[in-house]
Image: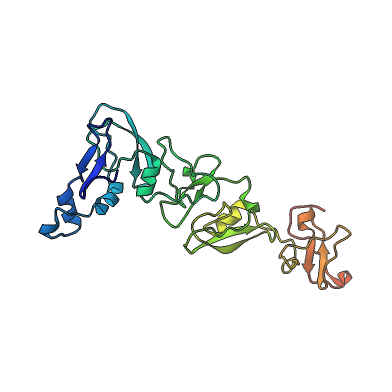
Amino acid sequence: MDDCPEGYWCHVGGDEQSTLCCPYENEITSFRKRKPVEESSTRKIDSSYFKNASCLMPLQVGEGVLMLPRFYFNSQTKQCLPFTYSGLGGNQNNFLSRGDCENSCPVFQNPCRQGEPATSASGQYILCTATGVDLCPANYWCHVGDSNSNSVCCPAADNPCVLPAETGTGQSVLVRWYFDRHARRCNRFVYTGSGGNENNFLAKQDCMARCPEFRNPCPIGDPSRSEKGTIVHCGDGTTGCPIGYWCHYGADAETTVCCQGAGDRCLLPMLPGVGAEKL
């Protein structure tokens, strides 16, 4: 494949007669349009320029009668995809194997933490956006990265709300939100653009809609929290409330927590509360 002289590329056809060195497409003309050259240097054009440009060329199946399995680089999705070459009349965007294609062109880097992105019937990655998350098929979620090319449908988790915050493996600085299952609240974090999980929301409202935050039953302030930030529950006979807190007995274990304002309960007025339960 590298035995051709400067200015030529190796066209591999269906036999030896059609496997020969072809001149790069529109060699002198296209090169001059993109990069001025001296008249005396037109016979020694750097082939590396055309090798890189081949990745931008459109799919060309040719005009022969053969059916040769090949790969081409899709510059829109940055994928190396299979196609059937007819044996004659193709361009440089024509590779014998997926490996040859991926070694020559800037292929798409999978941003999914686990698994492969969803693909369409034609084998291309399904692109999605923050406003088009419904484009993803069942059991996939829309990973919104730092560009359109890595905003794809990644395999979904059973419950993203229990996943830890994952900053990712990229280089970007993107402000996102995640649900802290211990603190039962949505917090801000910085996402690097690739390699994160589904516990990754563009806005706090999106996070709260998917992972409901803790319903604070206390009449004043927030419930007591441990050093790890988890809510302190009481009423089980073993866990007491810290000084300055009292045990609020709610309708369930979630709302039975330590609330601020402990004092002489006998001196406090009766408050029926604002909930819907009748206890």
Nearer the observer, 96 or 261: 96
Q: Can you say which quadrant of the picture contains the N terminus?
A: top left
Q: Quadrant of residue 45?
A: bottom left
Image height of 6 relative to 38, above or below: above
State the residue lying farthest toward the front.
Answer: 3
- The percent position of residue 161, horizontal first and vertical second, equals 63, 52
Give me the residue at 25% from left, 37% from top: 90
Left or right, 60 with reference to 32: right
The answer to which of 34 and 70 lies nearer the viewer is 70
Where 12 falls versus 56 (above or below)?
above
Residue located at (23% from left, 38% from top)? 20
Q: Is residue 181 something that shows in the picture?
A: yes
Residue 80 position within the rendered picture, expressed as x and y whole percent measured from the top left: 38, 43
Residue 266 point in image, percent of width and height = 89, 70
Q: Residue at the location (82% across, 59% down)? A: 249
- The part of the image, by quadrant, that contains residue 146 is bottom left
